[in-house]
Image (cartoon, rainbow, N blue to C red):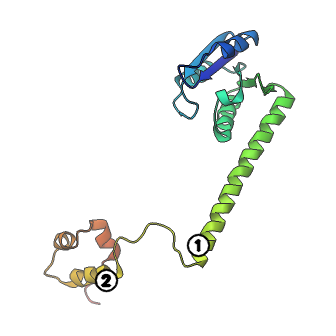
Amino acid sequence: MQIGYARISTHEQNLDLQRDALTRAGCEKLFTDTISGAKADRPGLAQALDFARSGDVLVVWKLDRLGRSLRDLIATITSLHENGVGFKSLTESIDTTTPGGKLIFHVFGALAEFERDLIRERTHAGLTAARARGKVGGRPRSLSPKKVAQLQALAADPSLSIADILELLKISRTTYYRYAKPAPAKGE
C-alpha cells in the first residue's frame, strides 16, 4: 500500500497541490500536518509512520515535507527501512524500493556521516588550539584555591560539624567531600 504524507507550514498555505500529486501517484491513505517542519512533534507524520506496515511505501511530494535537516530525513528513512517500509519522493524521483533509489539514499547517508565527521574534527581542532593557548575546557571549579584552603582548615577543626561548615561556606555536601581532606585514620 502507498501511504501519502503532506505537510504545510502555515494555515495560509494550501495542501491541495500535494494531495493531488499523492493521489495521482496511487496513495490510498493520506496523512497531513499544518506545522513547521522544524518542529519535532508532527502528529500526522507520527500517524503515518504508525500506520505503515512492512511492504508499504511512504510517499511525499518533496523531500523537505518529510524533514528539514538531512540528519532528520536520514533517521526517518532509516527507521522506515528497518521496518520494511519503502520511501518515495515524487519531485526528486527518489524511490528506495528500486536499486537506484537505494543508491541515492546511501549517498545521502554517506554525506551526512561526512558532515558529522567534519564537525567532530573541527571541534577537536578547536579544543586543541584552546589548550595550546592555556584555556581549559569544562565546568569551572566551584571553589577558589583560597576557599579550598579555608574549607580544609575548617574540616581539620574537630569542634565544627560538617553541617556547620556547609552553612558557613554556603556549599553543598558533595562540594565539601570533593575538597575536604579525609581525616587521618586512628593510629596514623
Q: Which residue is mark 2?
A: 146
Tell me whether circle 2 and circle 1 mark residues in contact (CB < 8 Å): no
Q: Is residue 162 above or below residue 37?
A: below
Q: Position of residue 46 (x, y in %)?
A: 56, 24
Residue 111: tell me if it is visible.
yes
Identify which residue is drawn at 71% across, 14% down. Answer: 22
Q: Nearer the viewer, residue 136 or 83?
A: 136
Identity of the residue drawn at 61% across and 78% down: 132
Q: Nearer the viewer, mark 2 or mark 1?
A: 1
Name the residue located 18 percent from the left edge and 84 percent from the top edge.
157
Residue 90 on image: x %, y %: 76, 22
The picture places residue 142, in percent across and down from the top left corner, at: 35, 70
**Residue 112: quarter of image:** top right
The quarter of the picture where residue 183 lies is bottom left
Query: Which part of the image, by quadrant, shows the N terminus?
Result: top right
From the viewer's perspective, tell me whether residue 14 is left or right of residue 60.
Answer: left
* Relative image position of residue 93 (x, y in whole percent): 81, 25
**Quadrant of image for the C terminus:** bottom left
Indicate which disc residue 130 carries.
Answer: 1
Binning the other alpha carbons within 10 Å of mark 1 as few (below 14), some (14 to 19) or many (20 upward) gives: few
Q: Taking 6 as reference, is 110 left or right?
A: right
Dot 2: few (<14), some (14–19), or many (≥20) neighbours within 10 Å? few
- Nearest the viewer among 170 and 23 is 23
The circle on residue 98 is none
Residue found at the far right of this picture? 100
Whether residue 125 is situated above or below residue 79 in the rendered picture: below
Q: What residue lies at 52% left-to-right and 23% top-to-bottom?
A: 43
Report if residue 183 is visible in the image: no
In the displayed image of the protein, which residue is found farthest to the front? 12
Q: Amino acid at mark 1?
A: Ala
Circle 1 SS class: helix
